[in-house]
């Protein structure tokens, strides 16, 4: 199973969680092109920053 992890700033994470932000955009840079173009992911995990593995409130 292929997973894409996207850490977000708290304000954007909370807006997505609350339903007021419906889309997340990333700049078109070589870094993101390498990770997104011509790839398929089974799931995407949005996190608030870089939480510890057992901190489920931020995942």
Image (tube, helix red, strand yellow):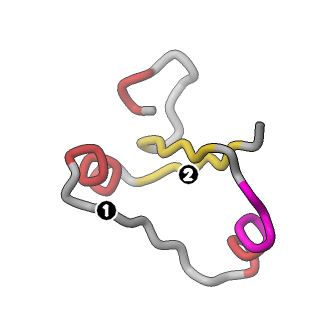
Label 1: how many residues lie within 10 Å, few (<14), some (14-19) or many (20+)? few
Q: Residue 57 in the image: x percent, y percent?
A: 36, 25
Q: Which mark is residue 44?
A: none
From the viewer's side, name the closer residue of 9 and 23: 23
Residue 32: image location, x then y, percent: 68, 71
Name the residue located 41 percent from the left edge and 42 percent from the top edge.
48
Q: Quadrant of residue 34?
A: bottom right
Query: Does residue 21 appear to the left or right of 46 in the view shown?
Result: left
Left-right relation of 6 to 13: right
**Mark 2 Cα within 10 Å, few/some/many (few <14, many 20+)?**
few
48 above or below 33? Answer: above
Taking the spot 78% from the left edge, 63% from the top edge, the residue there is 39
User: What SS does tag 1 mark?
Assistant: loop
Q: Quadrant of the C terminus?
A: top left
State the image coordinates of residue 15 (x, y, percent, origin top left): 24, 53
Task: Look at discs 1 and 2 and give the one toward the viewer.
Answer: 1
Mark 2 highlights which residue? 6
Q: Which residue is mark 1?
A: 22
Residue at (57% x, 22% y) in the render: 53
Q: In the image, is 1 to the left or to the right of 56?
A: right
- Which mark is first along the chain, 2 or 1? 2
Q: Secondary structure at mark 2?
A: strand
Q: CA distance from mark 1 to mark 2?
A: 15 Å
Point out the stretch of residues depicted in magenta.
34-40
Q: Quadrant of the N terminus?
A: top right
């Amino acid at each position: 199973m292929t997973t894409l992890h996207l850490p977000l700033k708290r304000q954007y994470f909370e807006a997505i969680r609350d339903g007021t932000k419906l889309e997340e955009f990333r700049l078109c840079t070589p870094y993101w092109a390498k990770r997104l173009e011509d790839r398929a992911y089974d799931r995407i995990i949005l996190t608030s920053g870089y939480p510890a593995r057992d901190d489920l409130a931020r995942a």
